[in-house]
Every structure is written in C-alpha cells, then in structure tokens.
Amino acid sequence: MKKQLLSLCIVIGTMTFAQYSDETRFGIKAGGNLSSITDGDSKSKPGFYGGVFVNIPISEAFNIQPEAVYSQQGAKLKDDYDFVGYTITNMKQTLGYINVPVMVQYNATPEFYLEAGPEFGLLINAQASGDINGTSNKASNKDGLKTFNFALDLGLGYRFSPNIGINARYIAGLSNIVKNSGGEISKNTNFQLGLNYYF
C-alpha cells in the first residue's frame, strides 16, 4: 500500500511539473505610454510601445515573464523660452528604447495578477524638437544621453480569456539618463496601458 501511494505521489508530481512546463506561452503586446523626465521642468508626453514576451509558470501562484519591447518615451517642456532674440516653443524630447523587463507575476486569481521586476533599457534614438520663432526644428541629441537605462517596474493585469489580457504598469527610472548633467539628475518615468495576446 505504501509503495502504491508513493508511486501515485510521484506520478502526480510528474504530471504537475509537466503541466507547468507545457504552459509556457509566447505572446505579443502593444499599447500607449505616458512618460516624463524627472528634471523639474517637464510634463508628460504620450507615446507607444510594442513587443514580445514569454510567460513561464514556475508554480500555481507565480510566473516569470521576460520581454523585449520597443518603447517611445520622453517629455515635453512646461514653459516657452526667450533666448537672445529667439522665442522657443513646443519643445519636446523623444526617446526610443529597446527595453527588457523581467517580471515576476503573482497570480492572485486565475485571471488577475500583480507583477514587479527590473527593466534594462538600450537607447536607440533620441530627438529634440520645437519651434524657434515659429519655425519647426528637430535634431538628434543621442550623443548627450546615456546608452543604458535601468528601471523598476510595478504593474497589474487581467486575463479576459486564455488569449487576451490587459496590463497596466508604472516604470520608475533609477539611473540618470544625461551624460553631463552638471549635478542635476534626470530619470525616466513611464505609465503604460495596453493589451497582451497569448499564442
């Protein structure tokens, strides 16, 4: 009897492990950003994000979800400026990152989850734009910014079906994004809201 019970436990344990392994799923995600830069002189700027992920169950309660996401971020300047006879208006900074979040998800219910994890970013483009005396101007300023960015992500999500879910996430930058900032620290902040599709 003990041997039969032990055998049954081993079979159940193997089936459970196999179930978690088999439930690893790939997916795509996309949505909107509302981002800013913490330098005291900026306001939020809308953008977008899109990418891919793999969702790996490690237990009934926890999943790990690594992602690779293109994210359009940045900020708008709050005020207009007059400088040596020039009137500068509508100034904004647009940043394009390839971000790699690694999220740990806690399944509070089969549908609803909370998540947190680090995010590693690679700056691939940066553009400053604005109007000078009514004429639109834009230029790359990537050389003045740091290539790598580090952040902490906090979020939650809901799975409407096995294939479709919604996700909201706040991303707090932890590293200074400007190379020569003169002692001032400028960090990315970002709020995301979008859809996930699981294959």
Image (cartoon, rainbow, N blue to C red):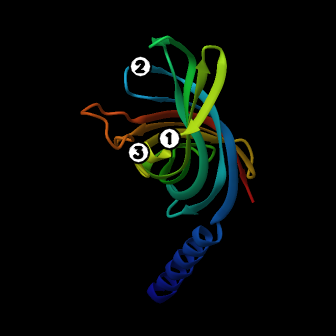
Neighbours of disc 1 within 10 Å: few (<14), some (14-19), many (20+): some
- How far is disc 1 from disc 2 in space, using C-alphas? 18 Å
| Marking on residue 50 | none
In this rendering, position of residue 128 left or right of residue 185: right
Tell me the kind of residue under disc 3: Ala
Residue visible at 53% across and 59% down in the picture: 66
| Residue labelled with disc 1 | 141
Q: Nearer the viewer, mark 1 or mark 2?
A: 1
User: On the rendered structure, is 185 left or right of 158?
Assistant: left
Badge 3 marks a residue whose secondary structure is: strand
Quick one: label 1 or label 2, which is nearer the N terminus? Answer: 2
Q: Position of residue 130 (x, y in %)?
A: 59, 24
Q: Which mark is residue 41?
A: 2
- From the viewer's side, name the closer residue of 62 and 109: 62
Query: Crowdedness of circle 2 by 10 Å Cα count: few (<14), some, many (20+)?
Result: few
User: Percent position (x, y) of residue 40?
Assistant: 37, 20
Answer whether labels 3 and 1 touch (C-beta < 8 Å): no
- Residue drawn 35% across and 41% down? 174
Instruction: Find out whether the residues at labels 1 and 2 contact each other: C-beta distance under 8 Å.
Output: no
* N-term mark: 3 or 2: 2
Please, what secondary structure does the residue beneath circle 1 have?
loop
**Label 1 amino acid?**
Asn
Whole-percent x, y for residue 77 in the image:
50, 20
Residue 173 point in image, percent of width and height: 40, 39
Badge 3: residue crowd in 10 Å (few <14, some 14–19, many ≥20): many
Q: Nearer the viewer, residue 35 or 86?
A: 86
Separation of marks 3 and 2 at Cα, in angstroms: 21 Å
